[in-house]
Image (tube, rainbow, N blue to C red):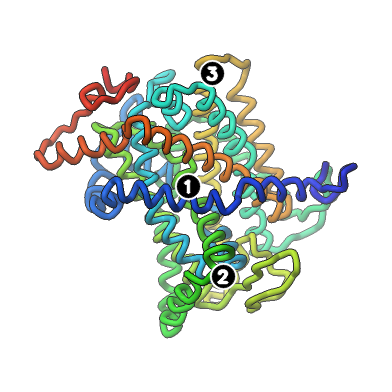
Amino acid sequence: MDDGVADAAGMTFADVVSAINGVIWSPALVWLLLGTGLMFSILTRFVQARLFREMIRLLFSSKESAQGISSFQALSVSLSGRVGTGNIAGVAAAIGFGGPSAVFWMWVVAFLGASTAYIEAALGQIYKEVDEGQFRGGPAYYFEKALGQKWYAWLFAIATILATGLLLPTVQSNSIGNAAELAFGGGAQISTFLGTVSLTKVMTGSIVVVVLGVIIFGGVKRIAHFTQIVVPFMALAYIVMAIIVILMNATALPSVISLIFSDIFSPMAMFGGAVFWGVKRGVYSNEAGQGTGPHAAAASEVQHPAQQGLVQAFSVYVDTLFVCTATAFMILITGAYNVQPDALNGTFAVQNLPVDTIIDSPAFTQLALESVMGGFGKVFVAIALFFFAFTTLLAYYYIAETNVAYIRRTLRIPYEITVLKLAMMAAVFYGAVREAGLAWGLGDIGVGLLAWLNVIGILLLFLMGQPALRALKDYEAQRKAGVTEYTFDPEKLGIKNADFWKK
């Protein structure tokens, strides 16, 4: 069933996707994510602010081992999942559908979400295990061992394979394709079994699939080594470019800040646009609460689980407070945006760009840079987006593979990893040539599904023993005592089934 062809019930594939999103992304999920972040911020005494300097120190304190990757590599792998399309096209969508004040709510969900990121990453470390010579862990592992509910762990694992292996990759490759088309032109139109698509998108999708295949067939070590080089370099280059744009429009900066704060508490913001889109795209970008970050966290070689929890909390800051803010300021300071609160009725609250400018795409960001730097701006965003989105695809593959490995502990399926790789490569090509709205709709289903399952699970874990909070208290006690080599004894802390650390 094509997204533009109605079935017997009169619904297109896009209609079905939209209907599912309406259920998953209800206001309840938005407030659940904000409330959970606030609760863990209070319970940890705002660890994301108190131990900020410790986060920086820990980035370079651990080394790669035969079984695990270093803290910096784990940060790079998790950042490769966090820093992606959401930082460029996602921010544009938040502004385009929720207005400039959505940026404020992206900041809020990042600050509060950093505490949630600590909790889930620490849990990933506490309950990790060694599988075929490498560390594995994540929500499926800690739901089985800490909750004692294997069915729930399986449910999360299957949902994660579906989300990160098939649904979310379509968004990343779609934005790469759209950015390439805007930067270099569409070229000839080609008729395919997926419909009529531009030659640029077909070529872009093909290149991404080939390069992706080369790397994911090389394993987690190759992924870690690739991302630790690419992610920091591209994030820094992107932020520097944003600073140049802001400095060239410095006189407009006060009005931009005023614009962001102008509508943050209005009834419309609280029950509709700004809060909904700020949280929705903020969580899509920084992944706090999704349960995807703990997979990379568990792969790290550390002395104490709390250490990787703190590193992952810092990654939320890098993603939203640095990279997303850079995008938002470039868009707002150059006026390269439209605001369309209700896309269905076609009306604009603000219209600075042509009506056919796609909101769910990198167009706002590319046009913002173009207004300052000419044609180079479009090309730069296309290149930056390629690396951001491509490294996110690598992170998605690693997450999906980890959950296949979890299921493989109980059920062996012939060639399961090879099937996953090929299925993901097909999804990447599909996303590259499809419409932006459909790709984002599929991605939102994946994000929302994981967020519901993970947040409910970690809240139940809080009620059943607070293992991540106990780990933080233990780490801070050792830190206060001035130890040079940290230790973690789960049995002493009353934490059960943390078998790796017993050794």
Residue at x 45% of width, y 53% of height: 34
Reading the image, the residue beneath label 2 is 99
Contact between marks 1 and 3 (CB within 8 A): the answer is no
Which comes before the other along the chain, label 2 or label 1? Answer: 2
Which label was assigned to residue 357?
none
Residue at x 66% of width, y 54% of height: 177
Q: Is residue 39 left or right of residue 415?
A: left
Is residue 387 visible in the rendered image? The answer is no
Is residue 176 visible in the rendered image? The answer is yes
Name the kind of residue labelled 1 in the image: Glu
Rendered location of residue 283, percent (x, y): 50, 51
Work out which quarter of the rendered image holds the N terminus and state it. top right
Establish if 413 lies above or below 471: above
What separation in Å lies between label 1 and label 3 (alpha carbons)? 26 Å
Q: Is residue 363 left or right of residue 67?
A: right
* Residue placed furthest toward the right: 8
Reading the image, the residue beneath label 3 is 408
Q: Secondary structure at mark 1?
A: loop
Which comes before the other along the chain, label 1 or label 3? Answer: 1
Q: Is residue 19 left or right of residue 2?
A: left
Establish if 130 lies above or below 385: above
Name the kind of residue labelled 2 in the image: Gly
Name the kind of residue labelled 3 in the image: Arg
Reading the image, the residue beneath label 1 is 287
What separation in Å lies between label 2 and label 1 (alpha carbons)? 22 Å
Residue at x 40% of width, y 60% of height: 321
